[in-house]
Image (cartoon, rainbow, N blue to C red):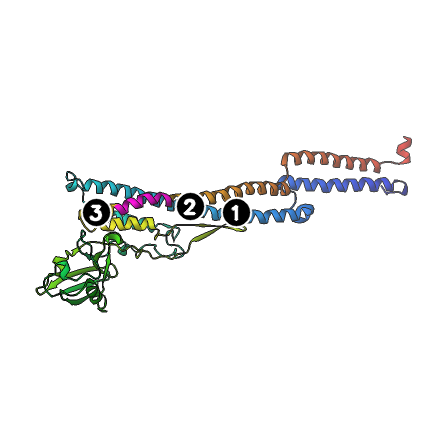
Amino acid sequence: MVTRVATYTNHTLLSDLALRNAARVTDLQNQASSGYKSRNYAGIADSTQRLLNLEGEYTRTEQYLRNTTQGKLRLQSMETAVDSMLTIATQMKTLMIQASSAQQADDVNIREEANQALQQIANLLNTNLDGRYLFAGGRSEEPAVDIEKIGAPDNYMSKLDTSVTAAATLASLGVTANGTIQIVSTDIDGNSSTSTVSYTTGDTINDVMDSINNVTTNRAMASLRGLGGEGTPLLNIENVGNGSITITETGTGDFLSKLGMEKIGNPRPDADYYLGDHQIMELRVDEQYDVSYGILAENPAFQQLIQGLGIAASTENQDALSTALGFINDAINDLPNVQGQIGLDIANVERFEERHQDFKVFAAQAISDIETVDVPLTLAELTQYETALQASFISISRAADLSLANYLR
């Protein structure tokens, strides 16, 4: 039928309504099949900027959560390692107390047990997670501890019960004849050197130390310090670099015997075993907040434990073992503080982790509300528009059949 002037308005109105219904039906069909309001930003123009902001925040939050997860794993690994150290220290304390008992001394091989404990401590301080040595500070790509240097330096020490001063003459300490001592030092690579030092009974301890320390070809060092760096000052002659040392006396001198120079491990009061640096690691957990975390292998609590075990691994002298037990007791008292510090770092990280997890849930829901549709509701709406579209087609069809002849019939 040809559209006439009289029917043009109705025809145009019905056609426009049908086209709008058809477009809406197509949109609803796409939404119902995909679950999304639109395939591009144009379809949600009024919410595009808010969606972009939420997506950016969501991406940053996911990165912060990855950071907190990684940091927490590192801290938990460190906490486990420190807990193991505390267990080892407590077990060694029990063994050393048993060894001090006359009835049980023969049943406990303290030197072997202490040496094994030292190796275990070294391995724990070299804890590695994802290629990162956790106790090494910023130099995390390298081991935190040199296992070869974690034991007590090979060392000769004067009598534990006799204080030695730098001004004391050898004669005052009982030396009766002039003589010569020979020092053979070997480093951990097997390179050795030999030096010879002569003395007279009128020399002071300071003279003897200068004579040893001024021999540039040797690897020996003489000093006055107590066992483990504490207590009564004693004469120490040790290898530089944690190798071995052997001292013998030639001629008629009796320097070694009168001073009671005994070969005994005496770790210096420092962290010569430590290979890392002093950088404390930082973890970005929020836009403007970093968490400083981590414990270095040179921590005083670790040093005390290593000193105690180093002494116990090198001698069965009861006075020395008492000193070693003191160091281990100090470590047992201090290690829980180290654990507490790590625990605080974990709690701090978890606080931000919980906050980001809450925001991630909120952002995900907000993004979903903008992008997606309620499929059952959309299907119901689609049914309504399909019905309306069918009604529009019927109306157009019936309007096309209107004529004066049909009307008169």
Q: Mark on residue 62?
A: 1
Left or right: 338, with 286 as reference point? left
Residue at (12, 63) in percent of width and height? 249
Query: Of the residues tagged 2 and 3, which is closer to the observer?
Result: 3
Rendered view: 399 above or below 302: above
Q: Are marks 2 and 3 in contact (CB under 8 Å)?
A: no
Image quarter for residue 35? top right
According to the picture, the residue beneath numbered tag 3 turns out to be 321
- Specify few, some or many for label 3: CA neighbours under 10 Å numbering under 14, 14-19, or 20 or more: many
N-terminal of the two: label 2 or label 1?
Answer: 1
Give the structural element (helix, strand or loop) at label 1.
helix
Is residue 336 on the magenta stretch? yes
According to the picture, the residue beneath numbered tag 2 turns out to be 73
Image quarter for residue 142? bottom left
Residue placed most toward the observer, 258 or 83: 258
Q: CA distance from mark 3 to mark 1?
A: 53 Å
Give the structural element (helix, strand or loop) at label 2.
helix
